[in-house]
Image (cartoon, rainbow, N blue to C red):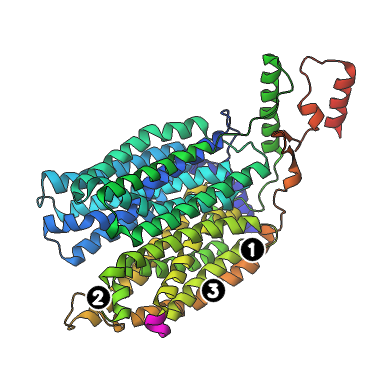
């Protein structure tokens, strides 16, 4: 009781220090939330370039005669910068998401541009410490953009958090394939100019897309049915592109230079189609006078404002610093550290795991293997986010966390005891489980602890991936691989499963307590998900003529009333409705 009174008496002070509540107001631009989402997805393409390290790092290694340990250090620096963004989360909470997006673009631009300068202008002359700092900086920019985009998306679509998270994280997962296509079509084999492109794209994204977000951000103002339909269309498009990219990766050796340009053009069309989301179905006009049309639009805005003002408060909404005192948060972090750490082991070592379990070199299927993991990773982000939203009110989202960790544990068990025959299914399950964690992590943070200071809360939870990677990948998998690979004729490669058996065993064993902890968390927090989700009957829709009426808080006949009517009967009806 004393602790509760202590935190309650200081909530306003802590909230002010961290930037206060992350509350979105209705956008003054028609379809503004969709404009913001389309721009944010394009920004996530930049954030996803963090996984493109392997495309250009060999050029840096050759120019500076690096050994593998130094190259791994650069990769670790970029991932730490990406996942540990608590400072950026605090700045975003204090100054807003637009500031966070600008900051992330600036970080990425400086980091990529410096690496290009180090590779093209003064090759071999830049100290390793500065290269590490540049890798950390562009990684930090990617993580900052992700943090700001997720914060804004969950504020704009607070009743559709699973839909928004699934689509955004799935697009983030496809960024690697998109960047790979750009490289193959335009820059191959010039890796230095590819770095220059990434630096320029960072600047252009900040100058062109962030102002759109600043102008259009705001609470979604469409009916539940319309929003759900658009998210389903977006999800279908993302699934199609995931399969499209997978097919390209399988047959990439057969694609000519002209073919890559055609593929790049199709990807550009797909990215541009995101900006069709704000388009609405044409509605039937019942008045011809412009003043009446303006009054109707004003009425819609008033209804949206009223809806935002009377919305039910979340079950729990605490400040970012208060969140750190909750047992639920540390249970959640324990699960994420194990799940994301084990997932990153596979993603970081897929090219070595394939020949190790196959017993021979597998260059011909290495690219399809890595691509398949990436596709299942992206599909899991999408499916976990969408499905957890579809069953909201029936199945708590926390049970999807249990499912994600279970996929990881089963996958590593298959790799440990199944061998080559189950290599692909096991790897796909691990990629699917890892992606599923990211599909539910952001909305769960907002639901368990509220949207107050969400950028700070999300940055704290994202740090679990960095901690897990340091423990399971750099701290265990790497040394075990080196120990078993030394002395083998194919060193520094390894074509024997002994190089990863211990790692698989540890990952599978650690998955068991993670599953138990996830079940306990789901039971402990089930009260958070007891509130019913938005229903389709909140609005009535005339599908034949495309006219939609919002009836959430005022009678439909009053919403469309003629502004020129001021007879006593209409006024009395309105007053009576408000009294009720």
Q: Tell me what residue is drawn at x 22 percent, y 50 percent.
A: 188
Q: Tell me what residue is drawn at x 84 percent, y 26 percent.
A: 574
Residue 174, above or below 465: above
In the rendered image, is residue 327 in sight? yes
Q: The N terminus appears in which quarter of the rendering?
A: bottom right
- Viewed as shown, does residue 107 lie left or right of 20? left
**Disc 3 vs disc 2: which is toward the camera?**
2
Kindly indicate whether the residue at mark 3 contacts the one at mark 1 (C-beta within 8 angstroms): no
Badge 1 marks a residue whose secondary structure is: loop
Q: Nearer the viewer, residue 166 or 402?
A: 166
Tell me where residue 548 appears, x and y as whole percent: 71, 34
**Mark sitting earlier along the chain (1/3):** 3
Badge 2 marks a residue whose secondary structure is: loop
Q: Tell me what residue is drawn at x 49 percent, y 37 percent.
A: 275
Q: Is residue 56 magenta?
A: no
Residue 388, above or below 111: below
- Figure quadrant of residue 492: bottom left
What residue is pinned by disc 2?
Answer: 361
- Figure quadrant of residue 497: bottom left
Segment colored magenta = 416-421
Q: How far apart, in angstroms, are the residues tagged by discs 1 and 2?
A: 48 Å
What residue is pinned by disc 1?
Answer: 525
Q: How far apart, in angstroms, are the residues tagged by discs 1 and 3?
A: 15 Å
**Disc 1 vs disc 3: which is toward the camera?**
3
Q: Nearer the viewer, residue 372 or 129?
A: 372
Q: The C terminus appears in which quarter of the rendering?
A: top right
- Viewed as shown, does residue 417 lie left or right of 27? left
- Viewed as shown, does residue 465 lie left or right of 125? right
Badge 3 marks a residue whose secondary structure is: helix
Predominant SS of the magenta segment: helix
**Mark sitting earlier along the chain (3/2):** 2
What residue is pinned by disc 3?
Answer: 515
């Amino acid at each position: 009781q004393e602790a509760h009174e202590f935190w309650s008496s200081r909530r306003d002070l802590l909230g002010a220090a961290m930037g206060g509540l992350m509350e979105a107001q209705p956008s003054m631009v028609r379809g503004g939330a969709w404009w913001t989402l389309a721009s944010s997805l394009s920004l996530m393409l930049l954030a996803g370039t963090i996984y493109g390290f392997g495309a250009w790092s060999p050029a840096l290694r050759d120019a500076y005669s690096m050994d593998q340990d130094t190259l791994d250090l650069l990769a670790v620096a970029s991932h730490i910068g990406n996942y540990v963004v608590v400072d950026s989360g605090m700045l975003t909470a204090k100054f807003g998401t637009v500031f966070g997006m600008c900051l992330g673009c600036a970080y990425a631009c400086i980091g990529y541009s410096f690496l290009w300068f180090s590779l093209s202008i003064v090759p071999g002359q830049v100290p390793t410490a500065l290269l590490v700092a540049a890798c950390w900086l562009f990684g930090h920019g990617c993580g900052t953009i992700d943090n700001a985009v997720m914060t804004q998306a969950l504020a704009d679509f607070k009743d559709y958090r699973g839909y928004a998270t699934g689509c955004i994280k799935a697009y983030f997962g496809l960024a690697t394939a998109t960047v790979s296509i750009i490289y193959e079509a335009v820059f191959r084999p010039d890796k230095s100019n590819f770095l220059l492109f990434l630096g320029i794209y960072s600047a252009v994204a900040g100058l062109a897309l962030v102002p759109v977000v600043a102008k259009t951000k705001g609470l979604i103002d469409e009916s539940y049915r319309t929003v759900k339909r658009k998210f389903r269309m977006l999800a279908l498009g993302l699934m199609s592109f995931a399969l499209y990219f997978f097919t390209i990766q399988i047959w990439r050796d057969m694609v000519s230079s002209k073919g890559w340009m055609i593929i790049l053009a199709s990807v550009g069309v797909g990215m541009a189609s995101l900006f069709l989301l704000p388009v609405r179905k044409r509605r039937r006009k019942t008045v011809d006078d412009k003043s009446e049309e303006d009054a109707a639009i004003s009425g819609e805005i008033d209804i949206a404002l009223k809806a935002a003002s009377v919305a039910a408060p979340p079950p729990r909404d605490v400040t970012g610093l208060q969140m750190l005192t909750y047992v639920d948060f540390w249970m959640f972090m324990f699960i994420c550290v194990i799940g994301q750490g084990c997932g990153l082991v596979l993603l970081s070592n897929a090219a070595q795991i394939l020949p190790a379990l196959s017993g021979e070199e597998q260059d011909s299927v290495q690219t399809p293997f890595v691509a398949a993991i990436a596709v299942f990773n992206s599909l899991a982000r999408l499916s976990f986010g969408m499905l957890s939203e579809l069953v909201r009110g029936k199945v708590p989202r926390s049970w999807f966390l249990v499912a994600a960790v279970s996929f990881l544990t089963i996958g590593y068990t298959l790799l440990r005891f199944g061998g080559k025959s189950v290599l692909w299914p096991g790897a796909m399950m691990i990629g699917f489980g890892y992606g599923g964690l990211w599909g539910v992590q952001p909305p769960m943070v907002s639901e368990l602890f509220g949207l107050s200071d969400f950028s700070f809360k999300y940055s704290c939870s994202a740090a679990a991936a960095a901690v897990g990677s340091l423990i399971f990948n750099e701290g265990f998998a790497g040394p075990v691989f080196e120990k078993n690979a030394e002395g083998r004729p194919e060193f520094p490669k390894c074509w024997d499963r002994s190089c990863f058996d211990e790692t698989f065993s540890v990952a599978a064993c650690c998955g068991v307590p993670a599953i138990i902890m996830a079940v306990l968390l789901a039971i402990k927090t089930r009260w958070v998900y007891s509130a019913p989700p938005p229903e389709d009957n909140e609005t009535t829709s005339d599908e034949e003529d495309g006219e939609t009426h919002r009836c959430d808080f005022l009678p439909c006949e009053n919403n469309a009333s003629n502004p020129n009517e001021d007879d006593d009967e209409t006024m009395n009806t309105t007053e009576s409705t408000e009294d009720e």
